Image (cartoon, grey):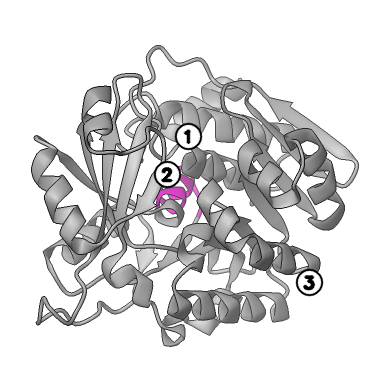
Amino acid sequence: MPDTQFDVIAIGNAIVDVIAPVTDDFLEAEDLPKGTMRLIDAERSVDLYGKMGQTKEISGGAAANTLAGATMLGLKTAFIGQVADDQLGEIYRHDLTSVGVSFDTPARPYSDKESEPPTGRCLILVAPDGERTMNTSLGASQFLPASAIDEDVIRASGVLFLEGYLWDPEEPRAAMRRAIQVARDAGRKVAFATCADFCVHMHGKDFRKLIDDGLIDILFVNEEEAGILEGSDPDAALESLAKDVPLVVMTRGGDGAVAARGDERATVKPEPVEQVKDLTGAGDLFAAGFLSGYCRDASLEESLIRGAVAAGEVISHWGARPEADLQALVAKRLG
């Protein structure tokens, strides 16, 4: 995309991931269904954090994770998200920009802990089998205003990438709607990730309207989310979505992933991983890998392979940010 300043610009939650290993008994004792993602208030986040033991902290959020991976795979990227003017906000900005993602959204003032929310955080509890249970306190991220949207940068970006997690709060939703319109008016592509089944349960009608209005060019879903969105089994959901969205990418867990573009179909199997340690960020990095191919006009098959390689790398260790050289891994896989 030679006429663009950025290949991908994303709008998403600015969340610091706080990760710790736990036992299945711990999850049961805390009444936390394994493998779920739930929103919690600040009081519960403090209580749960105190019980987690030793933790690892790293900047996260679905869209930001995708951008970090895409940047490592050679794309030029930018992020729009809301942090507070606090320590975690500084850590978040440093972590994201240090990998090469442009992040210029001003921090939200944070001087009164009772009236101004801190930077958001997600408490990620990793079970022995690698399954993660996420507990998110959105904090400042849910107050991203429409005024934070740099319309010139949106117009100068090849793809606008949006995460479904951020659709719930009113201010960010309005900001994303404005960004979509700016991108469409500029002839840019809009990619949307539904992110989680609860997002589809809560906002499926909104997501479906975006699709029906022709506002989504690339849809990232997993098979459960697709089934909920279309009210059918995953295979039928894929075919239904493919009639209305130019490009649908559906991940299928242990069965890999499939992409549909018009009548074209492509599939990929998961990359072999010696040991799955943490599934956090698997879908985010799959999207990163896929976009690294899409933005370079690669075939659907190659784009899927790139996604599988990136996802395979990130589940082999703790945290949602790659630790190995993704470009080298992709080059080796593609031969």
* Left or right: where 258 falls relative to 82: right
Q: Which of marks 2 and 3 precedes in the sequence?
A: 2
Q: Main secondary structure of the magenta part?
A: helix
10 Å crowding of disc 3: few (<14), some (14-19), many (20+) = few
State the residue lying farthest toward the right: 263
* Residue 67 falls left or right of residue 320: right
Query: Which percent across, then down, holds residue 25?
Result: 23, 24
Q: Is residue 293 visible?
A: no
- For residue 213, which numbered disc appears in the image? 3
Which residue is tagged 2?
A: 72
Q: Quadrant of residue 40?
A: bottom left
Residues at marks 1 and 2, CA–CA distance in whole angstroms: 7 Å
Magenta region: 65-75
Q: Nearer the viewer, residue 105 or 33?
A: 33
Residue drawn where x is 48% and y is 40% of the image:
285
The percent coordinates of residue 71 (x first, y second) are 44, 50
Asked if labels 2 and 1 touch by Cβ distance under 8 angstroms, the answer is yes
Q: Is residue 280 left or right of residue 218?
A: left
The residues bearing labels 3 and 2 have C-alpha atoms spaced at a distance of: 33 Å
Residue at x 61%, y 24% (from the top left corner) = 334
**Kind of residue at badge 3:** Asp
* 300 or 18: nearer the viewer: 18
Is 63 on the left-hand or right-hand side of 1?
left
Of the pair 73 and 256, the residue shown nearer to us = 256
What residue is drawn where x is 59% and y is 54%? Answer: 200
- Local crowd size for mark 1, using a 10 Å CA cut-off: few (<14), some (14–19), many (≥20): some
Tell me the CA gap for discs 1 and 3.
36 Å
Callout 3–callout 2 Cβ contact below 8 Å:
no
Residue to which mark 1 is pinned: 327
Q: Amino acid at mark 1?
A: Gln
Lower position in the chain sequence, tag 1 or tag 2: 2
Task: Look at discs 1 and 3 and give the one toward the viewer.
Answer: 3
